Amino acid sequence: MKKWLAVAVLAGLGVLGVVVEPAAQVKQGGPINAADTAWILTATALVLLMTPGLSFFYGGMVRLKNVVSTLLQSFMAMAVISLLWVVVGFSLSFGDSFHGLIGDPRTFFMFSGVGGETHPELAPTIPLLLFALFQLKFAIITPALITGAFAERVRFKAYVLFMVLFSLVIYAPLAHWTWHPEGFLRQWGVLDFAGGTVVHMSAGFAALAGAMVLGRRQVHLENVTHTPANLPFVLLGTGMLWFGWFGFNAGSALSASSVATLAFATTNTASAAAMLGWLAFDWLRGRQPSAVGACVGAVVGLVAVTPAAGFITVGQSIMVGLVASLVSNAAAHFKSRTALDDTLDVFPCHGLGGAVGMVLTGVLAKDVGLLYGQTRTFLMHLLALVVVSAFSFVGSYLLYKLVDRIVPLRVTREQEEQGLDLSQHGETVGETAVAPAAPEAPRAEPAPHSQPGVPVPA
């Protein structure tokens, strides 16, 4: 029955796409700026590249028998959220505002009224359709970020359902509050250049709720040392994220301008500082400089500078990266001593990294920050942190509970031990898993702890 329901929903979307007549764009602005349009087209592609980059970043960190499932979870976000955004996601985020809380789902339903003209408020110099596509890439990566918290134990169908609900109930309101001209956080004067609250804090606090609801993995209960499956994947994913983040932050200027250039520079500088800071803090605690540490540090710097990228100086971005790497490193170290099983440290890196970035934006933002003798922006940022944290955590916690009533969130213990690649997808890193017709002949020297289709590392 559930399988037929999923097929019916897809078929219904296909029918809607045919029968809904696209309306002409109602609000139109001035002429299109060719340079701005070219840059945002490029930035949109760069931000999309971040999601495959995230899949490699996460996929290299999990155990070998969960690599495929972890990669696929990020790619599924590209498909599911792309359709959801066209149907109603963009309307809820940027449609006509209902008291600064949520957009009217009818405004851009099925992308009706999303045309090739500029929009005086949302996209003054680029086509509104391009703006909608650029914002889509942010909506895609946000639920993908959460997957690192419940990696190696989440049921695939439950994850897809949660992703849909999270995007509608958590992400869309936050995007409206923060980025819509009439959103109440924007009206308060909260500055979030590219998604410190909307993307990273929402994902981080949803990750915390997910780790708590799904509970600990068996290997975590048994205190088994976690060995990443593929460190080159982690390095590759970090490079793709760093590269794509230039579109994420510099593209959020929505123009080919000096602001975009500043955001480009602060993004690179904060990431570099955070990478070195993370390695330095590890070294002070007696650890060797590691590839994973360098990669995680770089990503934390990218996270923290996201809300501040266009509002601070290049020199100040060094401090943003260093402070964020210290806070996230300490939080990840503390978390490792607790019973919380946030598999890939999503909350310490994205939840707290985004929060640090928002606080420092309130301190350092040009002309309105605490550093310039102004207190209002800083205080509004502190209040926004409370609102966003509570909304994201409580809302996500309730959504996990709701999903668990419909589809069990967690796989069985046997499926967890087998690995999600085989138990959820029937595939492995090596060959596609098939049920053997007869027992294989014993080998002279069988490899210990080997699994069907999963090569044992030398």
Image (cartoon, grey):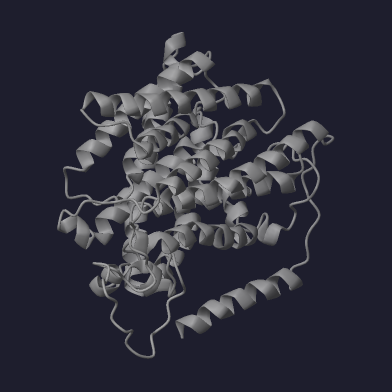
Question: Residue at left 32%, top 33%?
Answer: 328
Q: Is the residue 341 above or below the residue 413 in the image?
A: above
Q: Is the residue 328 above or below the residue 165 in the image?
A: above
Question: Residue at left 46%, top 9%?
Answer: 372
Quadrant, the C terminus: bottom left
| Camera sees residue 56 | yes
Question: Residue at left 63%, top 62%?
Answer: 87
Displayed quadrant of residue 374: top left
| Camera sees residue 391 | no
Question: Residue at left 33%, top 48%?
Answer: 344
Horizontal relation, residue 313 to residue 441: left or right: right
* Residue furthest to the right: 31
Please provide percent x and percent y for residue 223: 16, 53
* Closer to us: 26 or 265: 265
Q: Is the residue 355 above or below the residue 261 in the image?
A: below
Horizontal relation, residue 202 to residue 87: left or right: left
* Closer to us: 149 or 57: 57
Please provide percent x and percent y for residue 20: 74, 68
* Residue furthest to the top: 373
Horizontal relation, residue 379 to residue 121: left or right: left
Please provide percent x and percent y for residue 294: 39, 33
Tell me how many marks there are: 0
Q: Is the residue 184 above or below the residue 410 in the image?
A: above
